[in-house]
Structures are given as C-alpha cells and as structure tokens.
Image (cartoon, helix red, strand yellow):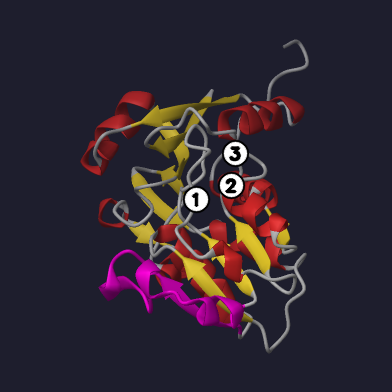
Amino acid sequence: MLHFGLIGKSLSHSFSRNFFTVKFQAERVDADYSLIEIENIDQIDSIIKERELSGFNVTIPYKESIIPYLDELSPEAVAVGAVNCVVVREGKKIGYNTDITGIDASLEWLSLNEKTRSLVLGSGGASKAVQHILKKRSIEYSVVSRDKSRGDYTYDELTPEIIKSHALIINTTPLGMSPNVESAPDIDYSALEPHHQLFDLVYNPATTLFLRRGEERGANTMGGIMMLQTQAIASWHIWQRELTIPQLSEAN
C-alpha cells in the first residue's frame, strides 16, 4: 500500500481525505490518504519517514516554506515560488504546483477579457499561483497585503475608487474558512457593483462571507470547489506518472 497525505495546519475543514479516499476506491488503487498537521515545516523529513509517504499535498501555511526542504522543483513551481504537491521518489522530494491548474480552470468560467483588472487579496503561496495565471492571461492585477512590502496596497489603502476600477477580486487568504466562517477580507463591500466578479479560493463553506457580501451587492461569485477538485486531480495525475501505483486485486 502507498501512503499519501495533506501537510498543513488546522486541517479539520479539509475535504482532501474524503476526495482521495473515494478516488482510490474508484480506481481500485491500494493507497490511503491522511490529514497530517504539523507545527513547523522542519518536521517534514521525519514525517515522510515515519509515515512512509510516497506523495503529499501541501496547504497553508507551508506552500512557500517547504521549498528549501525539497530536492527538485518543476518549472511551474519555480515560476510560482510555491509548492502544493510533492512526489517522494527514490529518496528525492520533487515539488510541483497544481494550484495553477485549478485556478486557470476556475477563471475559464468567469467573464474576463483584456480590459479586466484584478485585485488579489493576500500575498502567500496561493496568491503567487493566482498571479502566475493572471500574468499568463495578460490580466492586469494589484496585490493587497497586510504587509506593504509584499503588495501594491495595504487594506487600509483600498479606496472605493480602487475597488470599483478592479472588476475581478480574488481572495487567496484563509479568511472565511471553516470554522471561522464569520471572517472575511477587510475591504469596503459597499463599493462593489454588479459588474464585479468575486472568486474565493476557500471551498469550505461553499459560499463564504466574502462571497455573500458580494452577492448582496449584485456581484457574480465563485467559490473554491472547482479549484480544489481540479488541483487534486492534477496531483493524482502527477503521482500516477511518477510512481508505481499498486492496484487492488479483484479478490479485494
């Protein structure tokens, strides 16, 4: 049996274990998937050894900090500067970024054109993946961060005029994620108009407070379920390609 998992903090909200458990059963794969909470990324090597991990996903807050612990990076992971999928093969840890696949697929469903301007809320690993795809799509964007050195604006600097001039607003922060469902990015929601589109990478709950406030102003909204599923399938394809995946026998 092969062992996979999700590395992060506060993972009780995660759908990943259920998703991959069902996926493994459907494909008759002899593997399991665990939620692995760690307090510090420097525990990663011991966790891999103890759990005999063949691959794993990475979530908040370790998508950037895991990079120094990896042996190789895919070109996409290098370009983004963040990793959410790792293969452990012949003692080497190889990092990939499948968030960009999920983000790209999600943006396909929104009404975007060359004149669309975007605000990216947050400056962490997920934000970097969003920025990578917006650049690829030639969509002008500005990053909003609590830390001025990591963005174009702080939240205090966001005026109603700035919000109105950016039709696409993407939340890459964990604000609003279960169980903290009554939190949301600190922006002026009264500045939102029907021409706005709000995309939240959070998938649990399906409709966050951020999205509800957008809907109240007539904005079009999208949650993170499509991104979650698409990036997970992309991770599975990488593991299938890079590893020898054992199949369950008919007797099982």
* Amino acid type of the residue tagged 1 in the rendering: Ala
The residue tagged with tag 3: helix, strand or loop?
loop
Q: Tell me if I can see residue 154 in this picture.
A: no
Query: Which residue is label 3 attached to?
Result: 204
Is residue 163 on the magenta stretch?
Answer: yes
Which mark, residue 184?
1
Where are the magenta residues, as a range? 139-166
Picture coordinates of residue 204, whole percent (x, y):
59, 39
* Amino acid type of the residue tagged 2 in the rendering: Leu
> Is residue 9 found left or right of 147 in the rendered image?
right
Q: Tell me if I can see residue 119 in this picture.
A: yes
**Closer to the eye: label 3 or 2:** 2
Is residue 168 on the magenta stretch?
Answer: no
Picture coordinates of residue 234, whole percent (x, y):
63, 52
- Assess whether mark 2 and mark 1 are in contact (beta carbons under 8 angstroms): yes
Residue at screen point 61% across, 51% down: 231
Instruction: Compute the Cα span from label 3 to label 2.
Output: 11 Å
Picture coordinates of residue 40, whole percent (x, y):
24, 39
